[in-house]
Amino acid sequence: MKDFVILTINPGSSSTKCGLVKGEQVLMDKNIDHDRSEFADCKTFADQEPKRMALIQEALRESGIDLSTVDAVVGRGVGLYACEGGTYEIDDLAFDHATRDVAGIHHPATLGIQIAYKFGKMLGKPAFFVNPMPVDELCDEARMTGIKGCYRPARSHPLNQKQVAIRHSELTGRKYEESNYIILHLGGGISITAHRRGRAIDGNRAGDAQGPISPNRSGDICTDDIVALLKKGKTIEEINELASNRGGLVDLLGTDDLRKVKEMIAAGDKFAELCYNAMIYTIIKWTAMMAGALNGKVDAILMTGGMVFDTDLADRIKEGVGWIAPVYSYPGSFETEAMAAGAIRVLSGQEAVKKYTGRPVWQGFDFETA
């Protein structure tokens, strides 16, 4: 099989990650740093596209990258309506929806599709997005709450999770579409998801105050907790920030850096030790819940994300959940590899490209509209 060359674009708040992958080899994984002043005159993230595009082109020239060798371009899939997992072509509709941020994400990652689309047009090559952030493959039962008309959305880290699942399957001689996995993405935010035969059927709502205590997410809080915080003078906006960005270890201990937390524990800080232990405890608890979602039929538990570099944490989680299924560690993030791999599967004929419909993949149960 040809070693296809894929250019990947992954914009963030303070940098744009630009990758070049040939086959399974990452040739370049470069962070292009941005100063806030560069975008001072940009009212929306979409307004930043020409400037980021020019900076990427300059960085590629400085790195000696020959763009004529590129077979496809992949952008981070953010800002679209929820869809199933897979590799999608970036057509005019996907470009328009990402530009307008129809999902209301309000994050510079929405530029991934926009910049990849422009590069594809410029190079005369196909442009794709892979396992976008709003992947929704929940089973019907997982959507339900106990309040009529109130349903649970999918909130996880599908790009990294699905890449780890596919990679693990290849290494162990399995097929992702024929396997049951519990996948733990352990980063600043934590998502723990049940994957049944290639579909992420259930999981915690990462960043929505549901799930384990995380380095910068609150984890589980209930309505009584919210009422209590309101009575203490917190605003709804402040509570939402605790749930999605400034809670967890960073609120409890003033840092979301596990290395600093471990230093605090080593210095005898008992509260830091309790917080660290509570985070691990809630990770184990949520993993066991996802085993229930799979009726106990679990082929493997896969851990990924930056926190897995903490071998003490990884070992303790393995000890806590090893009774469910074998546990494997894939530390770090594989977003560049994941984006490139999706394009390669399509270009090589291993996977059919999907078309973005412009409508949420789930719009309610049939009996509600009958």
Image (cartoon, rainbow, N blue to C red):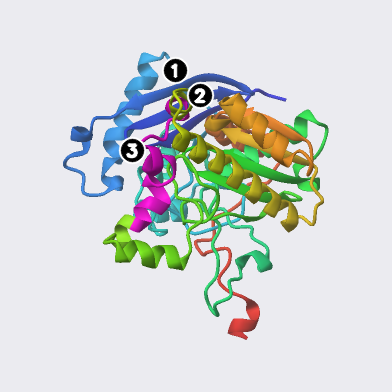
Sequence-wise, which precedes: disc 3 or disc 1? 3
Task: Tell me the CA gap for discs 3 and 2.
Answer: 21 Å
Q: Is residue 52 visible?
A: yes
**Relative horizontal placement of residue 292, taking residue 100 as reference (left or right):** right
- Image coords of residue 152 (percent x, y): 55, 65
The kind of secondary structure element at disc 2 is strand
Q: Residue at x 55, y 24 (%)?
A: 21
Majority secondary structure of magenta residues: helix
Q: Is residue 228 above or below residue 320?
A: below
Q: Residue at x 64, y 60 (%)?
A: 138
Give whichever of 29, 216 is nearer the camera.
216
- Image coords of residue 74 (percent x, y): 51, 37
Residue matched to label 2: 20
Residue matched to label 3: 13
The kind of secondary structure element at disc 3 is loop
- Image coords of residue 6 (percent x, y): 54, 29
Residue matched to label 1: 65
Q: Residue at x 64, y 64 (%)?
A: 142
Q: Is residue 266 magenta?
A: no
Q: Which residues are magenta?
A: 239-260
Query: Dot 3: within a 10 Å radius of its alpha carbon, few (fewer than 14), some, or many (20 or more) residues?
Result: few
Sequence-wise, which precedes: disc 2 or disc 1? 2
Query: Dot 2: within a 10 Å radius of its alpha carbon, few (fewer than 14), some, or many (20 or more) residues?
Result: many
The kind of secondary structure element at disc 1 is loop
Labelled pair 2, 1 in contact (Cβ < 8 Å): yes
- Image coords of residue 172 (percent x, y): 80, 31
Sequence-wise, which precedes: disc 3 or disc 2? 3
